[in-house]
Image (cartoon, rainbow, N blue to C red):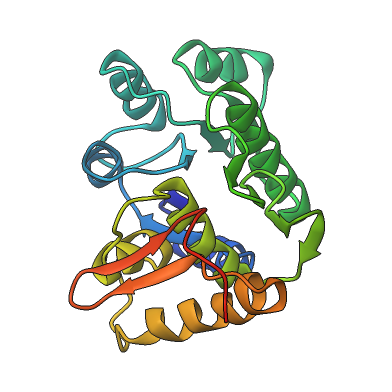
Amino acid sequence: MRLLIVEDERRLAAALARGLGAEGFAVDVVHDGVTGLHLARERDYDLIVLDIMLPGLNGYRVCAQLRAAGDDTPILMLTAKDGEYDEAEGLDTGADDYLTKPFSYVVLLARIRALLRRRTRAGARMLRIGDLTVDPAARRAERAGTDIALTAKEFAVLEHLAVHAGQVVSKSDILDHVWDFAYDGDPNIVEVYVSALRRKIDVPFGRRSITTLRGAGYRLEADGGRLA
């Protein structure tokens, strides 16, 4: 899943990005409201962590403009302010939740997971590809009733393939959605993770779910066949 953090406290933003990245999220970080609004409009995010006191355009206005444009991406607002009025104003502009600084990272992560679970129940259903089940909110995968142990990044790649099951997904598209926009490493890292997924979701079950289409990308499908 891809998250956007809009936070002008750079050390805090960097710490949040490191922590959430370790949880398997692809995280983009910007430090002002104008850039945050632009990215939120241009890219597909699963959740936005939005500070209220931002240069250029405050969080209230960013949130209000996104909601006015029909964007229903979950928004968790952060602020150094405190008080019922500030919380009410944030929620009235369309935010889904509100967290006052200073806060515990564990609480932030719990709030993020709760918002993602809520969105999953409302729209992004449990993903089922044949006997393979991918649960985006719980970040779990199982095949034929057997849990599959995946690293955070392996799950993120599988989730993206599962969302587009039956379609060809290019390597660049996987990079764009699973790694943040600042990633400048070897694009062949995708092949490494796809190979790891095959060893975990296919080989032990005698399946052949992930197909490589040379020069085009990868396709996850329910009836890809069985291993000989």
Query: Residue at (18%, 76%) from the top-left corner?
Result: 215
Where is residue 38? Give x, y as percent. 21, 41
Q: Is 174 left, or right, of 119 in this rendering? A: left
Q: Is 46 left, or right, of 218 in this rendering? A: right
Total residue callouts: 0
**Which picture quadrant has residue 180?**
bottom left
Where is residue 164? Give x, y as percent. 39, 48
Where is residue 101? Give x, y as percent. 65, 43
- Outermost right residue: 146
Where is residue 193? Give x, y as percent. 49, 79
Of residues 99 and 19, the one nearer the viewer is 19
Query: Residue at (33%, 29%) from the top-left corner?
Result: 62
- Outermost front residue: 228
Query: Residue at (33%, 69%) from the top-left corner?
Result: 175
Query: Residue at (61%, 72%) from the top-left corner?
Result: 202
**Which picture quadrant has residue 149?**
bottom right
Q: Is residue 107 shown to the viewer in this render?
A: yes
Quadrant position of the C terminus in the picture: bottom right
Of residues 202 and 5, the one nearer the viewer is 202
Q: Is 40 left, or right, of 23 in this rendering? A: left
Q: Is residue 1 shown to the viewer in this render?
A: no
Vertical position of residue 44 compared to residue 183: above or below:
above
